[in-house]
Amino acid sequence: MTDFNLLFLAGGFTCAVVLAMFLIPNILIVSYKRRLFDMPSERKVHSTPVSRLGGVSFFPVISVSFCLIVGIQLCIHSTFSTLSAPSIPYSFLFLAIGSMLLYLVGVMDDLVGVSYRYKFLVQLISATILTLSGTWLNTLGGLFGIWEIPAWAGIPLSIFIIIYITNAINLIDGIDGLASGLSSIALIAMCTMFILKQDYTHALLSLTALGVLLPFWVYNVFGYTRHRHKLFMGDTGSLTLGFIVSYLVIQLSTVHNGETAMDNRGLIISFSALFIPLVDVIRVVLHRLINGRSPFLPDRNHIHHKLLLTGLGPRAVLLTILLLAIFFIAINTLLSTQLNITVLAAVDAAVWLIFISATNHILRKKQQTTNAIQEQQL
């Protein structure tokens, strides 16, 4: 990586951090003046009203930072023709359209509420628009023996993946810092892969998204309600963030010109970075269906809810899940050259099942102890 590329990557990240640090406090001021709060309920962890408009900063900050840095690069290229101009895929235009649609429906949901059917429809439209740009998965990297896949299979699969990842990040947003923390880890991992592939445009997008998440994460995790420094990302943030992350996952997993389907490192790392929210959605949806409940109705059966019930505090739960996410990235990175991707997926699934089984065992023991104490009191 040249000093020129390094400078602009650092510039994009810094610009996003500075803009977020300016915008987020102003969002807090407006939220408290207009009393735009996320109210406590039996399904939620927080016990006091908190602003849920933190995600309003995501799309503007990412867009301004990315466009500013790319614009400066193009201006410099036109002045000094010896420097290479950045390659801007037209898929970014479709990404901007889809992100804006989800951003708007997210704002509506955070302010007045929107039905899950309407949100799903907008997600479907946004995902379909994105695939029209040619952004679709054309390989499974050897998973279950499948390598390259045709457009008729890759396009609907990509639409499903985009909606899947978007909702996974939306649903994992249950305790302070969890969705933003997992997304930050994923963005760091994917940015590193993009840089190794010399794809600096997508690396820049990853860094601008990371740049807005870090200040938000500090306010979300360490902000105090009584000081009016705490806020949530809301659906505005989680939908926008999930859509952008899903786009980066597909870009990193797709085989481009000059690459072969045998090079599946990008696919492995990108999905490893999001492994926990992706498998947690499957587990929760299956649990709801088995119990005869709608898979779209919320409950307290997510992994962070289970860990809270074991007696861990919110910070300890957050740290546990983030460390587990880093573990999956590290172990898959190390084993990706040694194991078949199908075997690697089986290893990941086994580790996850052991973790869930251990958590359930602790909960059963705790419930048995509670029942025994209650019987003694009677």
Image (cartoon, grey):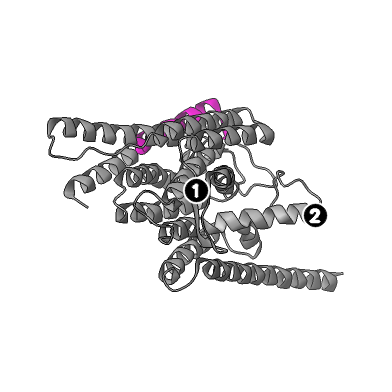
Res 16 seen here: yes
- Picture coordinates of residue 320, whole percent (x, y): 52, 64
Q: Give the residue type that dot 1 points to.
A: Leu
Residue found at x 52% / y 29%? 101
Up-down relation of residue 279 to residue 76 (above or below): below
- Picture coordinates of residue 313, whole percent (x, y): 57, 60
Q: Give the residue type that dot 2 points to.
A: Asn
The span shown in magenta is 19-37
- Picture coordinates of residue 89, whole percent (x, y): 36, 37
- Drawn side of residue 42 relative to residue 225, left or right: right
Res 222 seen here: no
- Picture coordinates of residue 23, whole percent (x, y): 39, 33
Looking at the picture, tell me which residue is in the foreground, 302 or 369.
Answer: 302
Residue found at x 48% / y 34%? 99
Type of secondary structure dominating the magenta stretch: helix
Looking at the picture, tell me which residue is in the foreground, 177 or 28.
Answer: 177
Mark closer to the chain start, 1 or 2: 1
Q: Residues within 10 Å of mark 2 (few under 14, many from 20)?
A: few
Which quarter of the rendering shows the C terminus? bottom right
Residue 137 got which mark? 1
Label 2's element? loop
Residue 291 got which mark? 2
Q: Is residue 33 shown in magenta?
A: yes
